[in-house]
Amino acid sequence: MRLRHHHGIGAKGFPTMRVIVLGSGVVGVTSAWYLARAGHEVTVLDRQPAAGMETSFANAGQLSYGYSAPWAGPGIPVKALKWLMMRHRPLVLWPRADQRLYTWLASMLANCTEAAYRLNKTRMVRLAEYSRDCLGDLRRETGIAYDGRSMGTLQLFRTQKQLDAVGGDTAVLDTFKVPYEVLDPAACIAAEPALRHVPGKFVGGLRLADDETGDAHIFTQRLATMAEAIGVRFRYGVTIKGLRTDGDLASGVVTATGVETADAYVAALGSFTPALLAPLGVRVPVYPVKGYSLTLPVKDGAGAPVSTVMDETYKVAITRLGDRIRVGGTAELAGFSLKLRKPRRETLEHSVTDLFPRGGDVAEASFWTGLRPMTPDGTPVVGPTRLRNLHLNTGHGTLGWTMACGSGRLLADLVTGRKPEIEAADLAIDRYAAA
């Protein structure tokens, strides 16, 4: 069986294909957009009734290009033990009979070396910086609006020890010429004026001026509408049961209502990708890391953040989205549970009321949880599989919104057969086979 190219010649002489994208989160929709722009006939399948309804729905709102870093790093195992003991702990582990969890944790621990951290952060920053450029191009081209701001991220340090450890991250930022400033308390207040109400709560910060913010859900839904306008078909309410294969090719998507066929397939199902591909012998080391968010109305504009403040102690992001404040955080390893747990809400409330006591109304907040698809090395999996017409775009962890446009553009180039604009080989799934 050979790849079938049905529809003539697409962009710049490349064959046009029928492509099925599995998943309509921010990563699936950006993939569909760039594939359609490359001239392909694209169909998106998703079980939800609309785009961006799961992990993309109420994430922290950050476009954290400079802040892109793996969770696995030197000192993390010791920190993790301390975090597990904190009242407002950023990490929660529910002991469970789940071999996939322990295999994933072992692989993550193996990435907690200085060398692995630098390699993984280098990969992540490369893709994140490219994604920033792609989103900028998309904004200029389409005028898409999503409660976005381009006012930087402030990583806020409550202790001198946190501030003293900043050199490890800035070294990689220097490598990529990512602009940053290490700030004293007065400069933190200049960047985020509402912090003047809580003097003594912090000793300094790291400001990443090029970082942005925005509502991933609004972005995903609006881009889906734009994608439909250029010919992408979105089929919602479709339960995906599995993939069929024929030799070294994927030959169809089995759904609850029948089999859908195409020339090429893109798996962008986040945390649900591994279960889909395991029967095919494609092992995707992605595990769901549950995150929580609060969305609260702004009560006092002058007492609210102007952009994103990362509370380093609790690993909580506090982001201004128009007339709302989004508070996101917590890494909970609890399988696929979507139970909303009260202690996680208390941690988010504590962080935002401690730093921005006048900013928003926590009594009016909506509480949400989503499953971030995390790889052990922090880098997403974007690229081909052993099935020649099956590509992956998954495993972005907490950075799906940050990396979506770059990943979607890269994915479209790889499917099309066009040389990508950035180095891509080390983002593919076979990096795990080589490990």
Image (cartoon, rainbow, N blue to C red):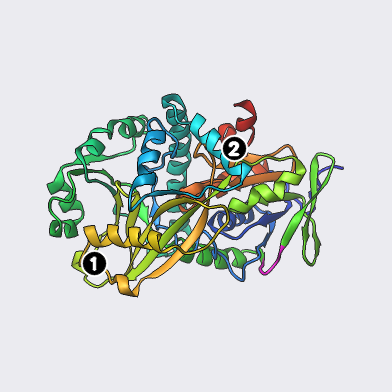
x, y percentage for residue 24? 60, 60
Dividing the picture into quadrants, the one containing residue 33 is bottom right
Residue 149 visible from this viewpoint:
no
Q: CA distance from mark 2 to mark 1?
A: 42 Å
Number of labelled discs? 2
x 60%, y 31%: residue: 431
Callout 1 environment at 10 Å: few (<14), some (14 to 19), or many (20+)? many
Indicate the quadrant containing the C terminus: top left, top right, bottom left or bottom right.
top right
265 and 376: which is toward the camera: 376
Q: Horizontally, is 62 left or right of 123 in the view?
A: left
> Looking at the picture, which amino acid does disc 1 mark?
Gly
Looking at the rendering, in which quadrant would you find the N terminus? top right
For image coordinates 67% across by 55% down, the residue present is 21
Q: Main secondary structure of the magenta part?
A: loop
Camera-nearest residue between 87 and 311: 87
In the picture of the structure, the residue carrying the numbered disc 2 is 103
SS state under label 2: helix
Quarter assignment of residue 164: top left
Do the CB atoms of the residues marked 2 and 1 lie less than 8 Å apart?
Answer: no
> Which numbered circle lies on residue 251?
none
Q: Is residue 238 magenta?
A: yes
| Magenta residues, start to end | 235-239
Residue 71, given in percent of the width and then of the height, sits at: 43, 40
Q: Nearer the viewer, mark 2 or mark 1?
A: 2
Q: Nearer the viewer, residue 78 or 132?
A: 78
Amino acid type of disc 2?
Thr
In the picture of the structure, the residue carrying the numbered disc 1 is 359
Precedes in sequence: disc 2 or disc 1: 2
